[in-house]
Amino acid sequence: MSKELTITPLNEWGYNFNTPLLMTGPCSVESEEQVKETARLLSQYQFDILRGGIWKPRTRPNTFEGIGSVGLKWLKEAGTALQKPVATEVANVKHVYEALRMGIDILWIGARTTVNPFAVQEICDALQGVDIPVLVKNPINPDLELWIGAFERLNRSGITKLAAIHRGFSTHEKSKYRNIPRWNIPIELKRRYPNLPIICDPSHICGNRELLREVAQTALDIGFDGIHLESHLNPDKALSDAKQQLTPDAYGELVASLLTRESLEENPYAENQLEILRSKIDHLDSYLLELLSERMDVVREIAEYKRENNLAIVQPSRWTEILESRLSTGLRKQLTEKFVKELFHAVHKESIHHQTEVMLNGENSKIMDETNK
Ligand code: PEP
Ligand code: MN
């Protein structure tokens, strides 16, 4: 099922990207002054790609749906002034042609477009033979295959400068996030396509400014390749996503506070240390299995005894007592209640399995003895 993707690494895209890659700029390009002044203020801080939305996918009409094609020129000029590549969202063929015509350097496919294979395919057809990087935001629903499908379609159009943007997933669950991260999904994407760069977009995950740092740091701790943060000259007055955008200064401060983790290849000392710790884990795991197997031996002895004395396997009061005492010990040892419960339920299930086996074997050998008489 898992087809290979052909990916050009970030350091071969023709730009001098930092590690991790940093992408910032306004949610929407609103005016020439707004995008150019935001970019100018951002230039004091580290970043690699200037973003700006030109056509905005909004929930309701009669809200600001983007400045439209006129903004492409302002965005491009803002980037050129700083010698930075610029990126915008494309959702249909017209957007692709306009963006290419105005020299936009990098395109991205938005979350509401990734969900629709017809729309993605149309974009891919329009891009056939064009050597431009394309970033693909995860679909709004947590469907990894749909996300992967977009990369496969782009690859089939000859596009290999690809990266994923993780912007969280829509949910009805009560959540502190605007779009819940479901970290397991980008992690699984990375496991299946280790060469595909993943950029985290804390802005659209959080929907507010307060949680941005925590989410960005988590992404770096996991080993994401980049961070995307929306920034605006005057966030509170922004025409879209006002609550989540940062002033350029706040962006600079946030980025400076992030701790970057070295990859193992860059740090052989860490790799050695990690080897030591991993062998400790291996040792502890085999000890754990040894102990569990020893425990089952005792369980079997108990079963023999119960069989000989005609006692039932499950003695509910004993089981309640085990669970309570293990829970209180586990909690004292910093283990969570859920984990200890699940662990002992699994151990109990395995014990019952061994005990029934002993009982049954006993019955069978009794029957055998009877028939052999
Ligand atoms: C955006 O980046 O401004 C945007 C609309 O994002 P998403 O597609 O992730 O909602
Ligand atoms: Mn936005």
Image: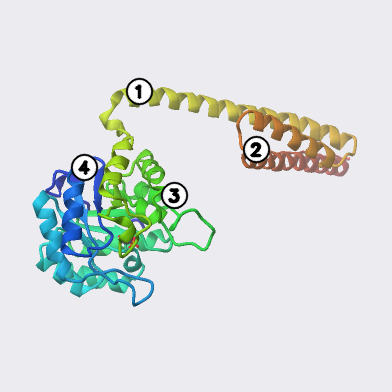
**Alpha carbon separation for disc pair 4 and 2:** 47 Å
State the image coordinates of residue 343 (x, y, percent, origin top left): 64, 39
The residue mark sitting in front, 4 or 2, is 4
Mark closest to the chain's N terminus, 4 or 2: 4
- Tell me the CA gap for discs 1 and 3: 27 Å
Q: Residue flagged by tag 4: what amino acid is it?
A: Tyr
In the foreground, 9 or 283: 9
Q: Amino acid at mark 2?
A: Val
- Residue at position x 9%, y 52% in the image: 81
State the CA–CA distance, disc 1 to disc 4. 35 Å
146 shown above or below 23: below
Residue at disc 2, secondary structure: helix
Of the numbered discs 4 and 3, the one sitting upstream in the chain is 4
Q: Which residue is mark 2?
A: 340
Q: Nearer the viewer, residue 81 or 221?
A: 81
Question: Residue 128, which numbered label?
Answer: none
Amino acid carrying mark 1 in the image: Asn
* Mark identifier at residue 45: 4
Q: Disc 2 and disc 3: Cα gap in Å?
A: 23 Å
Residue lying at the far bottom of the rendered structure:
62
Label 3: few (<14), some or many (≥20) within 10 Å?
A: few
Q: Position of residue 239 (x, y in %)?
A: 30, 65
* CA–CA distance in space, label 1 to label 2: 32 Å
Mark 3 sits on what residue? 184
Residue occupied by mark 1: 272
